[in-house]
Image (tube, helix red, strand yellow):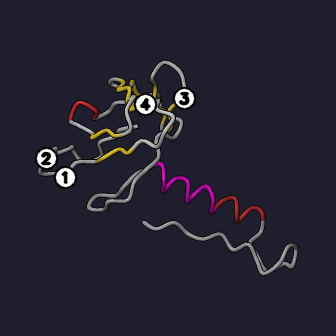
Amino acid sequence: MPLTDLNVGNAADDGTGQTLRSGGQLINENFGKVVEGPAAGTNDGGIVLWDGTSGRLVKDGQQPEQVSGFTEVTGTSYTLNAGDAGALVRTTNSSTVTITVPSNGSVAFAPRTVIS
């Protein structure tokens, strides 16, 4: 389901935008759509946040999920593999790092696979 734009009006304080309450409700609805992730049959993504400690992922205030592992990428390129499913891939090179997602024919990740 697509996100809904917030009506901010034509100019500051001109009374043409949404009220603070209805704008806040719309933001909450949009955020709920994002954290729910993709609906069946779509390929738009959701958001999962890493809490920065203990290798835990947190989604929408739910009980954190344990990350299945860590991959440290020290070079400037890396191709994801089946072992990265559910894992955290960390890049440490000071240059630009290219991460390649292989074709489904090469590595068939399960639907809704999360790689952080």
- Give the image quarter of residue 80: top left
Mark closer to the chain start, 4 or 2 = 4
- Residue lying farthest right? 13
* Residue marked by disc 2: 106
How far is the residue under mark 3 from the one under mark 2? 31 Å
Mark closer to the chain start, 3 or 4 = 3
Q: Is residue 30 magenta?
A: yes
Identify which residue is drawn at 22% across, 48% down. Answer: 102
Name the amino acid, label 2: Ser
Q: Secondary structure at mark 4?
A: strand
* Residue marked by disc 4: 90
Q: Secondary structure at mark 1?
A: loop
Image: magenta residue range = 26-35
The numbered disc on residue 80 is none
What percent of the width, then of the height, locates residue 11? Answer: 83, 78
- Give the image quarter of residue 75: top left
* Residue marked by disc 3: 51
What percent of the width, then of the height, locates residue 71? Answer: 35, 26
Name the amino acid, label 4: Arg
- Residue lying farthest top? 54
The numbered disc on residue 103 is 1
Question: Neighbour class for label 4 at 10 Å: few (<14), some, many (≥20)?
Answer: few
Point out the image quarter for the C terminus.
Answer: top left
